[in-house]
Image (cartoon, rainbow, N blue to C red):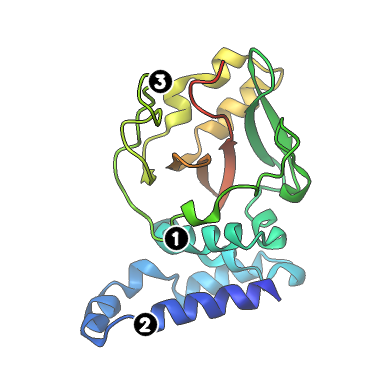
Amino acid sequence: MRLIALFVFLGLFFACTPKSNEKNLNANKKTQTPTANQHKTQAKELSPEDEDLPFLYFGEQDFKDFYTAFFVAFSQKDYDALNSVIHPKYGLNIIETSGAMPQIVNVKDISEYKLPTGQSLFEIDMRTIGFEMLEDELPIVKCDEPNYFDKLGAFTSDENLLEHQQLIEHINPKNKEELLEIEKTIKKTVYNTANYIYYFSFIDGRWYLTFLDVRRPCEA
């Protein structure tokens, strides 16, 4: 089962931490993992079929751990786990370009989405996925640079880049007001210059992937 493999991976990852760091890990334990009470509170709201999904127990302060679990699942194409991070009401809003203007496609099942080229969302070099979160300023697009960016890599920030770009206002879709409300919930932006921009929201005690920008920079 993919979820079991995910937890085994994470278990081995943290088991390899040197003993000299154990005190620091224990000192940070309260902020890195939800408390027993948080688990109980969330478990009351879960349906039995959802209780084994890995992303339901990360609190607002646990984004670093959530980040690792999410991108491990992404690299493994674990559709069940990834779909659990799509909000049941708002869905995942994917920003793409198939013509002159960007458009937003709403999906509820990430496995069914195809890029405008017809390729799967997961047809990327998985070696470019960063499993450890790097907090830094987001890269800046520079079309006159060979790589189109002022720096390369995967960077995480509290900046709500989508809101700053005013892209939804520019596209002006029929459900603009609803999308603008969802946009306001974004807490973390992950900009990976090798693939996509991931927007994560914390809604009703859970992290969700609410927007995903799959466009490539400097394309007409």
- Amino acid carrying mark 1 in the image: Phe
Q: Is residue 31 above or below residue 10?
A: above
User: What residue would you read off at disc 3?
Assistant: 143
- 202 displayed left or right of 157: right
Residue at the spot 78% in from the left edge and 46% down from the top edge = 112
Q: Nearer the viewer, residue 47 or 104?
A: 104
The local crowd at label 1, few if under 14, some if 14 to 19, many if 20 or more residues have their Cα within 10 Å, is: some
Would residue 59 be seen by someone viewing this image from the given angle? no
Q: Earlier in the sequence, mark 2 or mark 3?
A: 2
Of callouts 1 and 3, the N-terminal one: 1
- Residue hosting label 2: 16
* Residue 146 as seen in the image, left or right of residue 137: right
Amino acid carrying label 2: it is: Cys
Q: Are marks 2 and 1 in contact (CB under 8 Å)?
A: no
Q: Residue furthest bottom?
A: 19
Query: Callout 3: helix, strand or loop?
Result: loop
Tag 3: amino acid: Cys
Q: Position of residue 20 (x, y in %)?
A: 21, 84
Query: Gap in Å between the C-alphas at discs 2 and 1?
Result: 15 Å
Quadrant position of the N terminus in the picture: bottom right
User: Quick one: SS at disc 1?
Assistant: loop
- Marked residue nearer the N-terminal end (2 or 1): 2
